[in-house]
Image (tube, rainbow, N blue to C red):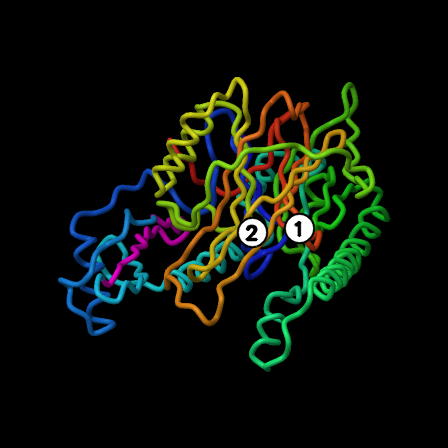
Amino acid sequence: MKYSRSPRSYPGLGHAIMLVALGVSIIFGNVEVSAQEPPNLKQAALERVAERHGLSVTDLQVVGGPATGRYPLQNKTVFHFKVRDTRSRQIYGVALDDAAREVDAENLQADENALHEVKYGKLDPKLAERLAEIADKTPVTVSIWLKMPPEEDVEQSRRGRRRRGELPATRNEIAALERRAEARLAARVRSVVAPVIARLERMGYSPTTIDGSPIIYAVLPTAAIRAVAGWNDIERIYLSEPAYAAGSLRPVATHVRPDEMSGTVPFENLGQGDSFNAANTLGKPTILIFGNKGEAARFTELLNDKTNAKRIEEVDFTRDWVVVVVRGIRPSGGYGIQIQGVSRAPGVVKLHVKLTNPDPQRSVTQALTYPYHLIKIQRSKLSMPAGTKWGVHTLSGELIAQTIYPQQSSAIEGTTMKIR
């Protein structure tokens, strides 16, 4: 099972985390799901919300269990609660530390990122640890994530039309907007990838890329990795082990043209949701693939929706794969992600997803959400050799998450969080 970080970031690529499971361990970002909630925190959460909004504690109730966020460089743990007003049905979010003090999770994350920059620079901790153990000339396979300018939000443009009283865009107009957005994205990616590729080639290295993604894979010695980390256009560098061609040390080519994608793969819907019992665990767009009950069990522990958890538990993994796409952390309810198609080519699987945003005219849950969609695919309909590349693409063609599954060798790791 493999967890992957997204090439697009929310709000920045520097916050994206490459996630992977090795064996039956699942490695996440800054959080540990096994953290125990201190006593009396639920009552404290009710009191903080009541005080802040002028409500009665007796009219409030905690929804589900708290999501647990860890900030290891600050040695802090935060518990995120959703609190419902039973009269108005309004949902409020509140974050408390283990002493029941209210905290600003966004500021904590910003501080954690700043501390990371001081301690590791642009290197992922796992990569920094590896480099500290080896000689300067030892080659290491890395994935280099580049800085990207923000993307224009097509949905925001459509809402702007409504606010200005203009007629809604027609289906053809929307399709044209999406084609233009795809072209702009491709141009932006090329503009940031090409100069870095050229510099690496001038240094005598042979980097590879994935179309539509600001990620470069390369085998570099320690000294070169540290030099590249000093370039202004680099967001972060991760330890990586890509799939290799059989009997060769040459990385498998990752370029696949759209016209090479052949055939659709049937799938069955298992469920959707938008909450987990661990904050920041799936904070970025992510693909999760399960090939057995052991792998899946680690994920079902995270689900607040026990119906979806049961559906996964009932899957016969000798017949089916389970695939999950997670949109990442969203500031409120009303956001969604839906797999609308699966296509394949030799060594490549693409998930085509529709992203939905809140209707500004409707009230939504005012708490952090993590939209996700679960599906299962028959093994007989989709064979997956080691090193199969998976990508999640929006309907406009943007690659928002990717992974390699099944792994052929050691996988890309992120920072440290394990579910035991």
Q: For the point 70% across and 37% down, which residue is it?
A: 343
Q: Locate the C terminus by quadrant.
A: top left
Image x and y of residue 213, in percent: 71, 50
Image x and y of residue 249, in percent: 77, 26
Q: For the point 37% across and 61% down, which residue is it?
A: 365
| Dot placed on the residue nearer the N-terminal end, 1 or 2 | 2
Q: Which of the pair 262/231 is nearer the observer? A: 262
Above or below residue 416? Residue 310 is: above
- Figure disc tally: 2
Task: Tell me if label 1 and label 2 are in contact, CB under 8 Å.
Answer: yes
In the drawing, does residue 245 fall left or right of residue 242?
right
Among the 4 quarters of the image, the one containing residue 2: top right
Among the 4 quarters of the image, the one containing residue 332: bottom left
Q: For the point 67% across and 59% down, which residue is it?
A: 147
Type of secondary structure dominating the magenta stretch: strand
Q: Which of the pair 200/382 is nearer the observer? A: 382
Assess whether residue 71 is covered by the magenta stretch: yes
Above or below residue 321? Residue 156 is: below
- Residue placed under numbered mark 1 in the picture: 145
Assess whether residue 49 is covered by the magenta stretch: no
Above or below residue 181? Residue 319 is: above
Q: Is disc 1 placed on a helix, strand or loop?
A: strand
Above or below residue 373? Residue 122 is: below
**What amino acid type is highlighted by mark number 1?**
Trp
> Badge 1 local density, few (<14 within 10 Å), some, or many (20+)?
many
Could you tell me how far apart the alpha carbons at marks 1 and 2 are, in whole angstroms?
9 Å
| Range shown magenta | 68-85
Q: Is disc 2 placed on a helix, strand or loop?
A: loop
Q: For the point 68% across and 23% down, which residue is it?
A: 385
- Residue placed under numbered mark 2 in the picture: 16
